[in-house]
Each structure stands twice: as C-alpha cells, then as structure tokens.
Image (cartoon, rainbow, N blue to C red):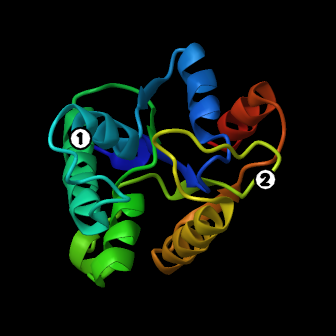
Amino acid sequence: MSRNRFVLITGCSGGGKSSLLSGLKGKGYKVVEEPGRRIVNEERAGTGDALPWVDPTAFARRAVNMSRSDLLSAEHLRGTIFFDRGLIDAAVALQFACDISLEETIGSTRPYNKTVFLAPPWPEIYQNDEDRRHDLETAMDEYDRLESALTTLNYNIQFLPKVSIEDRVEFVLDRL
C-alpha cells in the first residue's frame, strides 16, 4: 500500500499545527494525533518517567515507537491521512537527545508523502501549557532541526502561511 497518502504536518511548537489538523478533520479527513501529546497524557497517568522535561531520551524512544505504530495502524485506512508530527519528529528528538542518526531510526524508506507541511515559528500565537513547558527559543531550535532533517531526507517542504485555519486548510489541500 502506498504511503504517498500519508501527509506529515510538522514544525514549530505552537505554530498552529493542531488547529490546522482540526480543520482538516472537520472536512472529513483522517488525522493521527500528535504522539508527544499522547505520551505526555499517558505518562501523567502512570510513572511520569518518559516526559520530555524528565527524560528526553525515554520520551523520544517512546515517540519513535508510537509513530511507527501509527504508521502501521494507518495502512488499513483509506484515503489521505494527515499526521500531527510523526516519525521524523521523533527521530529528530532522538538524535538531539542521544545522537542516534536519522538513518538508524528511520531507515532508507520515507514514511510520508514527498510533500511535507512545515509550520514556521509564530510568536504571536505561541503559548505554553502544562504539556508544552519549553520556551519559544527552544521551540525555534527544534524547528531548525526539523527543517534541516526534512531537507536531508529530500522532502519537498511547503511552509505553512500564517493565515486563518480555513486558509491553511485550503493551502494544504491545493498543494496535494
């Protein structure tokens, strides 16, 4: 089954990705929720050891495993599926946490559509919350690592414009 229909939306924390994905879901598209947020929720309900601010390596390893599982689970679904972050984000986090290469984590195949949508830093809407404890500067550093990884992996990066959710949804759909 072709993973060309697996579309990654990634980028800067607080850049409006989840709002965009909610808009796509509202149009009837399937959306895979962000692994990081799901892990934080699970960890808060359990031991709390694999939180990004407690053990970044354990968190990144869990994100890699969850992202792989998400990809496998999506294989049986029909149509275009949008991923809120995913395996590339997790691989970049793991590389940053403990210097494991992208190639070692991802392998030689590319799990997503060649076109990837990247949300740039958007300071005007950036907010911290219980699950997003890092500051904007840290988020921007992560964004730079993601952009570099996507370039290295030869993805066609489409930078999301800083416009309304409705306009972002149309931007994404027009480019697919």
Question: Residue 100 in the image: x percent, y percent?
Answer: 26, 81
Disc 1 target residue: 43
Q: Residue furthest left?
A: 47
In the rendered image, is residue 67 in sight? yes
Which quadrant would the C terminus be assigned to in this image? top right
Q: Quadrant of residue 53?
A: bottom left
- Front residue of 40 and 176: 40
Q: Is residue 130 above or below residue 85?
A: above
How far, Cα to Cα, is label 1 from label 2?
28 Å
In the rendered image, is residue 102 in sight? no
Total marks shown come to: 2
Question: Which of disc 2 and disc 1 is earlier in sequence?
Answer: 1
Hey, what amino acid is under mark 1? Answer: Glu
- Front residue of 134 and 125: 134
Q: Residue at x 60, y 72 (%)?
A: 141
Q: Residues within 10 Å of mark 2 (few under 14, many from 20)?
A: few
Q: Is residue 89 above or below residue 7?
A: below
Q: Quadrant of residue 2?
A: top left
Provide the secondary structure element on which disc 2 rests: loop
Residue 69 left/right relative to 53: left
